[in-house]
Image (cartoon, rainbow, N blue to C red):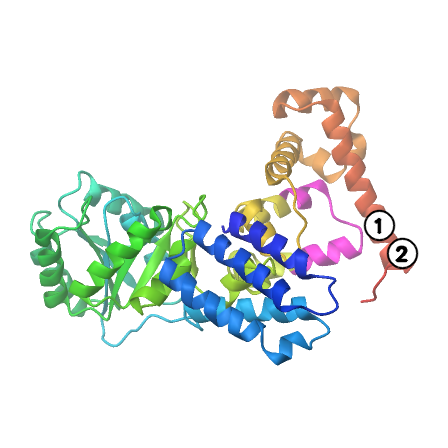
């Protein structure tokens, strides 16, 4: 997410670092490079124009010109302006009624149906009791797709007569009032392009369901076309916000940086992967930090708290400090890491993380996992028994080499040795606990 934009900003900031003071020319050059970076990221040109004018005005102010850390001041200005155009703070969902209706709209191919399921799972994890409504009766297999997704996450899907979207929605909302469901999520039909028939149907669905939220799903890959569609949807449906999907792909980031400024409506969630739990709450300040290479530790912590077993992690920490952890424990750690998402997304959340070949890193993790999975329980708990014949058996089961196994065992022993020294206070560290 934002890889190209991050690289461009890193180069710009590098040219400013180390300068005792900034001149007007330094700032003008940096601002011009920021402008080009945003335009290349497919940010709306009107948004770029306003953004650049504000940054330049503040950067040429007396506070920055006299600062002894001008590069840091410049970064702060850019970060503040990025946050400003994306909406200052996170906008939560509104739950005015019981049941609360959330209407999901968007063009076909934006990932709308999958996003409905992702949102339902997110709400379920946060204590609500949602139900999904299949109101897309046009796209082949759309209802079946939603039913399968609902089954996968343990959430009921209402399909009605599978013919009339307005009737399906009306009955579903009425049924929800008589049950324990507190949130009704409507998966409405999309089209390959906007037409009046489509919008009229959506207006009828909105009228009979009286939704608290009308969210449009926008594909980040479509760039400025997404902004134009968002304007039209907002004009007809009075949107309350957006969910931007496919942010894990090679999207340039322009939609995220433009859509709120152009429409006045906030982004509330972003889709960051294909798995059903890959839906993140949108925090403008965190995204701005990631764009500028400052990481997003808060999101990483929240993800870990949500996905990982706290008691098991505490037990693992005790084992590490006592140097008692085994390859069986290491195997569990690898499973936990995978729960947090792709390695590439985790690296981006770490401030100042070095540029590494993520594909190589993920390849090594897969090798390690394959090796440990091919061991017996006894071998994982006591790797010292791994003789030549055992290693050959493991290579056949894991598709690796004896050298790969030896590297893993060497790293494992080095880690145990380091933890023993740490426990005894014999390890010289540049910091203290």
- Give SS at disc 2: loop
Q: Nearer the viewer, residue 12 or 159?
A: 12
Q: Nearer the viewer, residue 83 or 401?
A: 83
Q: Nearer the viewer, residue 409 or 209?
A: 209
Residue denoted by label 1: 418
Can the viewer see residue 186? Answer: yes
Give me the C-alpha separation between circle 1 and circle 2: 7 Å
x, y (%) of residue 66?
A: 69, 77
Residue 19 image label: none
- Whether label 1 touches label 2, CB < 8 Å: yes
In the figure, residue 412 lies in which quadrant?
A: top right
Horizontally, residue 229 falls left or right of residue 77, namely left
Q: Is residue 20 magenta?
A: no
Horizontally, residue 362 falls left or right of residue 66, namely left
Q: Which residues are magenta?
A: 314-331
Q: Residue at x 74, y 48 (%)?
A: 325
Q: Can you say whether 201 is above or below 379 in the image?
A: below
Q: Quadrant of the C terminus?
A: bottom right
x, y (%) of residue 290?
A: 55, 59
Mark 1, residues whose alpha carbon is within 10 Å: few (<14), some, or many (≥20)?
Answer: some
- Give SS at disc 1: helix
Mark 2, residues whose alpha carbon is within 10 Å: few (<14), some, or many (≥20)?
Answer: few
First in sequence: mark 1 vs mark 2:
1
Residue denoted by label 2: 427
Q: Outermost residue toward the bottom?
A: 62
x, y (%) of residue 222?
A: 33, 47
């Amino acid at each position: 997410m934002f890889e190209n934009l991050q690289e461009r900003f890193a180069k710009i900031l590098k040219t400013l670092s180390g300068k005792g003071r900034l001149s007007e020319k330094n700032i003008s050059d940096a601002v011009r490079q920021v402008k080009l970076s945003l335009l290349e990221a497919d940010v709306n040109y009107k948004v770029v124009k306003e953004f650049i004018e504000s940054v330049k005005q503040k950067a040429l102010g007396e506070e920055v010109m006299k600062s002894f850390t001008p590069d840091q001041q410049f970064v702060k200005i850019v970060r503040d302006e990025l946050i400003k155009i994306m909406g200052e703070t996170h906008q939560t969902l509104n739950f005015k009624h019981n049941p609360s209706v959330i209407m999901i709209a968007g063009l076909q191919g934006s990932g709308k149906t999958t996003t409905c399921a992702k949102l339902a799972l997110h709400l379920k994890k946060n204590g609500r009791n949602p139900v999904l409504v299949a109101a897309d009766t046009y796209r082949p297999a759309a209802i079946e797709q939603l039913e399968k997704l609902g089954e996968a996450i343990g959430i009921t899907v209402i399909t009605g007569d599978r013919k009339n979207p307005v009737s399906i929605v009306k009955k579903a909302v009425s049924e929800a009032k008589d049950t324990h469901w507190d949130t009704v999520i409507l998966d409405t039909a999309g089209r390959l392009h906007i037409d009046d028939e489509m919008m009229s149907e959506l207006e009828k669905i909105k009228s009979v369901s009286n939704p608290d939220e009308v969210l449009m799903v926008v594909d980040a890959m479509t760039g400025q076309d997404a902004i134009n569609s968002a304007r039209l949807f907002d004009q007809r449906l009075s949107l309350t916000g957006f969910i931007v999907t496919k942010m894990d792909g090679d999207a340039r980031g322009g939609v995220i940086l433009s859509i709120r400024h152009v429409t006045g409506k906030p982004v509330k969630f972003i889709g960051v992967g294909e798995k059903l739990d890959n839906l993140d709450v949108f925090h403008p300040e965190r995204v701005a930090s990631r764009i500028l290479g400052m990481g997003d530790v808060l999101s990483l912590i929240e993800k870990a708290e949500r996905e990982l077993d706290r008691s098991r992690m505490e037990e693992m920490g005790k084992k590490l400090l006592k140097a008692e952890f085994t390859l069986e424990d290491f195997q569990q750690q690898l499973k936990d890491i995978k729960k947090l998402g792709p390695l590439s997304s985790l690296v981006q959340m770490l401030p100042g993380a070095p540029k590494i070949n993520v594909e190589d890193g993920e390849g090594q993790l897969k090798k390690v996992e394959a090796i440990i999975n091919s061991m017996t329980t006894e071998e994982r708990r006591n790797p010292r028994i791994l003789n030549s014949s055992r290693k050959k058996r493991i290579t056949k089961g894991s598709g690796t080499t004896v050298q790969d196994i030896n590297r893993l065992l060497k790293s494992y022993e080095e880690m145990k040795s380091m933890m023993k020294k740490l426990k005894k206070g014999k390890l010289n560290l540049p910091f203290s606990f």
